Amino acid sequence: MEGLRLLPHFQASQDTKHLRDCDACKQRETVTKRQHMGCGYEAPLPEALGTARPWTPHWWVMQGWDASICPGYSTTLPEVVEVTYAYGQWEAGTLTEWVASMEGEAPSRALLDALAMRKAGINERQHAEYDERERARGQR
């Protein structure tokens, strides 16, 4: 899920405050503007109006990647929130016990894949921070 990989970048960014509250955004922006922003609550833009351009982390842009939906939406989906809670257990080595205490079974393959995606997003953000520091020093 895109939201799992975007979350670390989205949390670290200072230029996304206007995207962090979907209800406020719905009040503040027109439907067409939200469609251009890739809002998950709106129908996609008609082809005649162009392509949605959701906020995308600078590091992703440098890799030639684009977000497909507004991260204000994708990072708050229930699945992303659940994986974010599970991530702390995974890092502590207590995921199996934590899942078993709630569901009575081992973590699913889908949860393990989602946790790996969350970790990939964290690794990407760490790479981006390193690149930013190196650029600031004039070494890249």
Image (cartoon, grey):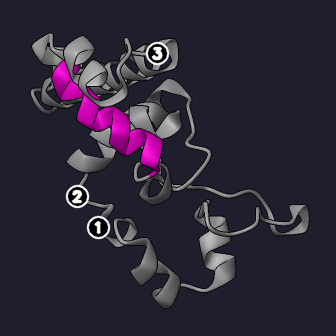
Residue at left offset 29%, top offset 19%: 100
Q: Is residue 14 above or below residue 67?
A: below
Q: SS of the residue at dot 1?
A: helix
Report which residue position mark 3 lands on. 108
Q: CA distance from mark 3 to mark 2?
A: 35 Å
Residue at left offset 35%, top offset 26%: 118
Asked whether 28 falls inside the magenta stretch, the response is: no
Residue 58 seen in the current view:
no
Could you say where residue 126 lies in the image, as x and y percent from the top left?
21, 24
Q: Residues within 10 Å of mark 3 (few under 14, many from 20)?
A: few
- Image quadrant where residue 90 sits: top left
Could you say where residue 72 lies in the image, as x and y percent from the top left?
43, 59
Residue at left offset 35%, top offset 33%: 83
**Callouts 2 and 1 close, C-beta under 8 Å:** yes
Asked whether 81 falls inside the magenta stretch, the response is: yes
Q: Nearer the viewer, residue 114 or 138?
A: 114
Q: Earlier in the sequence, mark 1 or mark 3?
A: 1
Could you say where residue 34 lies in the image, as x and y percent from the top left?
60, 73
